[in-house]
Image (cartoon, rainbow, N blue to C red):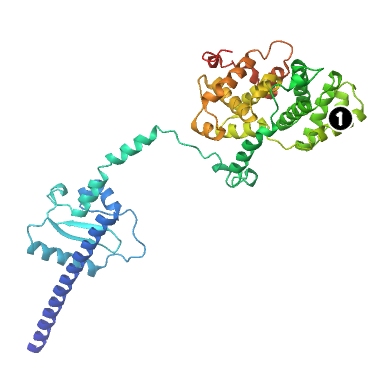
Amino acid sequence: MVISNDKTSNSINSTTLQDQMGTRKFEQNNRKALAIINQNMAVEGRYPCIVNKRAFSEKHGVYEKKQADPVHRPITRRLAAQIASTKQTRAEGNKKSNLGISNWNDFGQYIFIDDEPSKSMEDQPVPMSLEQTEAMLSEPDHMEEVEMEDIDEESLLDIDNSDANNPLAVVDYIKDLYAHYTKIESASCVSPNYMAEQFDINERMRAVLIDWLIEVHDKFDLLHETLFLTVNLIDRFLEKQTVARKKLQLVGLVAMLLACKYEEVSVPVVEDLILISDKAYSRKEVLEMEKLMVNTLQFNMSVPTSYVFIKRFLKAAQADKKLELLAFFLVELSLVEYEMLKFPPSMLAAAGVYTAQCTIYGFKQWNKTCEWHANYSEDQLLECSSLMVDFHKNAGRGKLTGVYRKYYSSKFSYTAKYEPASFLLENNPL
């Protein structure tokens, strides 16, 4: 029995010694791990959840994450015994410290066990790394000042971002395309005084022809680009070729026939155009004029008209249907007027969008994105825009009311009913 007792005693002492050594090793590992964690938190800003959760859970003396790490095992009885033993050893050895044990448990939870539950956590020292992290989070004054400075600055919108996956939008080439259009648009322009070279027609006859063609265009329900190309072909042809008065309507019909062949899927036949002209011309005359026109223009039909630019500028203005219709209404009014030939197609389109925005919103509206894509400032557009406002005011008067009646219909949402932006004429009297 004595031998047995000695073995038992030795076994107990050995177990106690191993537990104490294991406890010390465990405590040292914990301290080393904590030092590394605190250092990483201070330098790299890791584990922000520790600081963010402090205000919520500090009354419980526990800092924890919302979700447990599924990789780690749950706390075992042996680990719980080691934590309790280490707590007791530390409490007896160091009464000055208010923190008993800090450790990451098997769930990945950061646990603080209080030796004195009656004492609030506010009186206990906070690790240096947490103090530094909280100080960084609680002093965002400099960052806020920088952000506030940028709020008032108008940013440039990426109007093509929404079409990145649309192959028809050719986002990769769109900027180069419009740079090319801007470069060659002067080749499609005509002299604003070309009518002086005509001996039998004048500006008024041209206006009557185009006003009538706008009605024909609407009757056939053709595309917008067909109308703009038709007017361009007429002016470019009349600049190079003298035409008798009785042939002017034929020039208009053939110009529309050519524009339809270039833009439309379903092209009106020659007989339809003869019928719409009240059989004023024969089929032979139409085909002969077609040959004369394409040879005079050297088959150059692909030119940037105002339509090409207005679609781009409307996109820059983030236009809705109302703004789009009003812009087209103002530009089509300008097509009838001979004096508007002094403006290039891009300026005509930009002024149409600018005037439409002013008409709808009731104040001058031309943001940085519109200016950047149009390459025209607000001051550069005022002259052209003022003329458009004047045309808008007189659209329903006189004999040439084709555009007004077209846009006064339900098909175009009664766009012609908008009140003109007369305030644009205050500083720019005509």
Residue 15's spot in the image, x, y percent? 15, 78
- Quarter of the image where the N terminus is located: bottom left
Residue 305's spot in the image, x, y percent? 68, 32
How many numbered marks appear? 1
Residue 131's spot in the image, x, y percent? 20, 50
In the depicted structure, whether residue 367 falls above or below residue 173: above
Q: Residue at x 80, y 17 (%)?
A: 201
On screen, residue 241 versus residue 280, left or right, reads: left
In the depicted structure, whether residue 274 falls above or below residue 36: above
Residue 145's spot in the image, x, y percent? 31, 37
Farthest residue, direction front: 197
- Quarter of the image where the C terminus is located: top right
On screen, residue 268 versus residue 347, left or right, reads: right
- What is the crowding at mark 1: few (fewer than 14 residues within 10 Å), some, or many (at least 20)? some
Quarter-of-image position of residue 338: top right
On screen, residue 49 versus residue 192, left or right, reads: left
The amino acid type of the residue labelled 1 equals Met
Q: For mark 1, what is the residue? A: 289
Q: Is residue 409 visible?
A: no
* Residue sitting nearer the eye, 56 or 259: 259
Q: Residue at x 14, y 48 (%)?
A: 120
Q: Is residue 249 visible?
A: yes
On screen, residue 409 versus residue 174, left or right, reads: right
Give the structural element (helix, strand or loop) at label 1.
helix
In the depicted structure, whether residue 234 falls above or below residue 63: above
Quarter-of-image position of residue 110: bottom left
* Residue sitting nearer the eye, 280 or 96: 280
